[in-house]
Image (spheres, rainbow, N blue to C red):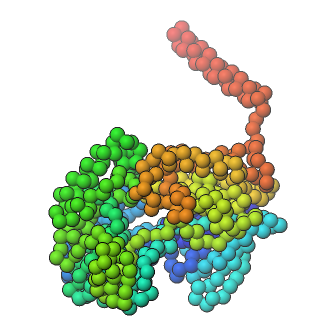
Amino acid sequence: MEHAVDVAIIGAGISGICAAIILKKQLKDGANIIIYEKAGSLGGTWRDNVYPVRAFLCGFKASIDPDLWPPRVRPRILSPPLYCLSSFPNNFSPGIMASQSEMLAYMNDIIDQNCLRSNIQCNTQLTSAVWDPSTHRYRLSLEDTITNETSVTTSQALVAASGILSAPRMPRVPGMGEFEGKMFHSSRWESDVDLRNRGVAVIGNGASAAQVIPGIVAVEGIKVTQFMKKPNWHLAAFSSGNPETQKRIRESRYIFRITRMSWYLLLEVVYLMVYGSDLLRPLAMKISKNYTLKAAPAKYHDMLIPDYPIGCRRIIFDTSYFESLRRDNVRLVNQPVKRMTETGVITGDGQYLDFDVIIAATGFDTHLTPLSIRGKTKTLQEYYADCGGPEAYLGTMVPGFPNLFILGGPNSATAYMPFPFLVECQMNLVLPLIRRLGSTDIDTIEVTQRASNKYNRTLRKRFRNSVWNTFAGRSYKTEESGKHTFLFPGCATLFWWWTRSPRWQDFLVNGKIYKPRRMSRLTTAIFAAMFLVIILVVVLVTLDKKHDRRLT
């Protein structure tokens, strides 16, 4: 590199931290890195989600008396070693699911190990980023979230790492504004709300609800009613394993790498059974059905067995959700909430129920683009609208937006592989491009419209015959156009292979198709001939020495 590249990273969650560490490790002084975080501390999703299962583990009571917390409710799922950077093994407690405190500690630890603490500017929200063609830089408008003061700066490269689980999706139910009790989303948990002796409604039955419900059922006098529209496929949580074995795995880098690869291969087998093979999918469905029949209360069996293929929706790994359904103070209702009133809800079958608190465990709006970024001619939202929904080249770059790199962009997530692994895959693509920006004769790099269109046509073809292209898989599609914008329609190995290095013919460098310098055919032939001559000489000398030894 001939000069240091100014890189602004938006968001200090796991993806932003991963990007900063990789850039500093690989480019060293070749990049001036600054991370803008709108909150008061780093962590992203792991900072915001403080509902009881995680809140209890990180020291917050959240209206739960620890003495009332049954040991069987505590999570006992082994954290895969894939939920970390490959070069920085995590130090999670052996045999216990990664808690919020452990994830935050890990992120803080790797930030300190790489001396990046001074590169993070908290309480700073990006209000807009506009490409300036005269300076070949993005003009960033920033706002201090505490003082509301505004400032302007510029950056040559912009890395959008705002996350895919940052925008809570509230249920769209008539009368929501009429409810006089407490109502909040599970990712915006209000820990000052006392749940004791209260009637609590939990709307939703996805992964969030499966973690929230076991975390509140032990509260004194609480009565929980869960509303679900469609059942999910459930599988047993992985065994915790032997604590001593897990400790040795963490302490040895080589054993950790072997364990990490083993987890990777195991998850690829899961992909093959659930998503990649029509022949093996019935086996996965049978395993899930048998587990549900064994672990869930008999009165809910008909409600909990889905009528669609496994993989259409997110699979739930059960830690203690089914056990919670066995409690007398928990009820499962397979009716949607039709309307909210001042004191409760009216269900789809016309039944009225009173509640003091309503918790929306309804997931996130993964199709939302929270950042305001303007490229050469249009904003990111306008480009997505023109395409009928978000789309990008390898989920990372968008035509008309030079030097912009999106982590966790459209179609970059899988339904089974931990997110840090996918971010590292994207950084395999991003890193060489940012390195090129350090050259004095290179100002801009962007993907061509042709390459982006070709890539997204390939994705649409792969979706047509996939398990996600069903009615049950509509949660992964945009409501307006029915376009798949969230998942990558393939295994993680394929995503890694496609992002392992840039295809330079897919990029415009300074507005022109990039043609890397290559040796002429004559030069290549000369070097090849010289190499063969050297090999021949070495062989002849070796044979001659052996002949001399025989004569002596």
- Residue 541 in the image: above or below residue 311: above
**Camera-side residue of 376 and 94:** 376
How far across and how far down the image is residue 334, in percent?
29, 69
Residue at left offset 55%, top offset 64%:
480
Extreme-top residue of the structure = 551
Can the viewer see residue 116?
no
Can the viewer see residue 168?
yes
Q: Quadrant of residue 538?
A: top right
**Camera-side residue of 489 and 136:** 489
- Residue 335 in the image: above or below residue 199: above
Residue at left offset 64%, top offset 46%:
454
Q: Quadrant of residue 187?
A: bottom left
Q: Quadrant of residue 475?
A: bottom left
Residue at left offset 50%, top offset 72%:
166
**Camera-side residue of 37 and 250:** 37
- The N terminus lies in quadrant: bottom right
**Camera-side residue of 155 and 344:** 344
Count of number-bearing discs: 0
Extreme-front residue of the structure = 350
How far across and how far down the image is residue 182, in percent?
37, 88
Extreme-right residue of the structure = 134
How far across and how far down the image is residue 142, in percent?
66, 79
How far across and how far down the image is residue 489, in percent?
49, 50
Residue at left offset 22%, top offset 71%:
324
